Amino acid sequence: MEFFRSFRKEILSAATSGLIISLLAWSMGFSFWVGTAQAGNLSNVSDTLSNSAPSSTANHTIAFTTATSTLPGQTIVVTFDPLTSGFTGVGGVSYTDVSSTGWTMAINNVCGAPVNEIQLTATSTSSLTFTVCSDDTIAPGAKTLYIGNNKITNPGTAGSYVIRINGTMADSGDTRVAIINNVTMTASVDTSLTFVISPLATGTVVNVATTTGQSATTSLAFGTLTPNVPKILGQQLKVTTNAKNGFTVTVQQNHNMLSASGADINLFADQNATSTPSPWTAPSNILDATTTYGHYGLTSDDDINSSEFISGGGNKWVGNLDTPRAVFSHTGPADGSTPTKGSANVAIKIEIASLQEAANDYQNTLTYVCTPVF
């Protein structure tokens, strides 16, 4: 009898202990007793497109934060639109198209020295698979994958598309991108052009030379000329325009300065119509060579034609005025005031020698033309 009483006591004690253990397991959770690996959710998941228009190629900046370590050999799979595979070109992505932060893309896609390397190990029509190198562990934290070179083409239909990040790594998550038609902006701007010729006062410096008299808007009155005493008159040219490619101002004479008697004053130098800006020289004054009795030429303080007038100290003159001669230009819109861009000064210098024929009515006409290029 004593044996049976002792055996019954041991059974009751064991049953009570089992009940207590069961209650503890229920109240504290089974994981208190058995260690398990729990999958986590990625946080801050996003995919920023360089172009969200339908059927357009785009780069992808995929960002997310892992909650757990990614272990050697585990994979990270990025799937573009797992529902309909609307993105194309995914299979053509290579490791040279991918860069990253938070982990290291293996150089030449071969695992090496860094301790947090991943490789691009597989591609499909809709996914890219990255694998952690066998000796590496990737710590939790913020990660990015940048897929460049416009390798992936957006779906042809506007809408919202899933980008999924999972694999054999513990964490996973989804984000979405919006594919939407571009917005076309249109506008028009009217063309504008204002060209003004203004007088210059006595004593105004134009490309080193100093004017000897006052000009007018529509006339250059040199008055009575004295042999071997040059006179200089000038005008200011002002251009205001919104022409994208700028403008050019040319000047042309109708003929030499001519009197009713038929005598004329010739173009610089000695009627050679010098086209390359050159230092001033006096008329040669050779008897019976009427073209050497007097001449006039033009200068500009603009930087036209690689500063042909103002280079080398300036004070250079031309005489090729029988055809349109460019004296002022700019390659873009002009404000009518900024030197060499919106304004320039030009001057005419005239000098006679003792053989210049007498007359009180020498004259000609200068025509300025401003041509914008819109």
Image: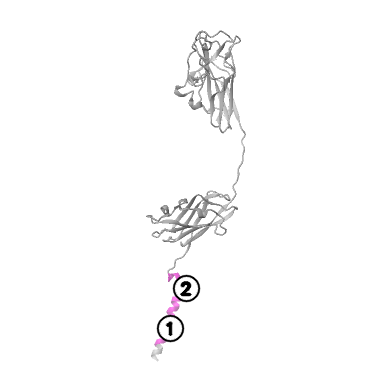
Mark 2, secondary structure of its residue: helix
The residue that label 2 is drawn on is 26
Task: Give the residue displayed 43% in from the left and 56% down from the top.
Answer: 118
Q: Is 84 placed left or right of 131 in the picture?
A: right
Q: Quadrant of the C terminus?
A: top right
Mark 1, secondary structure of its residue: helix
Which residues make up the magenta segment? Answer: 6-34
Looking at the image, is 327 positioned above or below residue 256? below
Label 2 is placed on what type of residue?
Answer: Trp
Looking at the image, is 5 positioned above or below residue 215? below
- Hey, which residue is sitting farthest bottom in the picture? 1
Other-residue count near label 2 (Cα within 10 Å), few / some / many at <14 / 14–19 / ≥20: few
Q: Position of residue 279 (x, y in %)?
A: 47, 18
Task: Give the residue displayed 41% in from the left and 85% down from the top.
Answer: 9
The residue that label 1 is drawn on is 12
Sequence-first disc among 1 and 2: 1
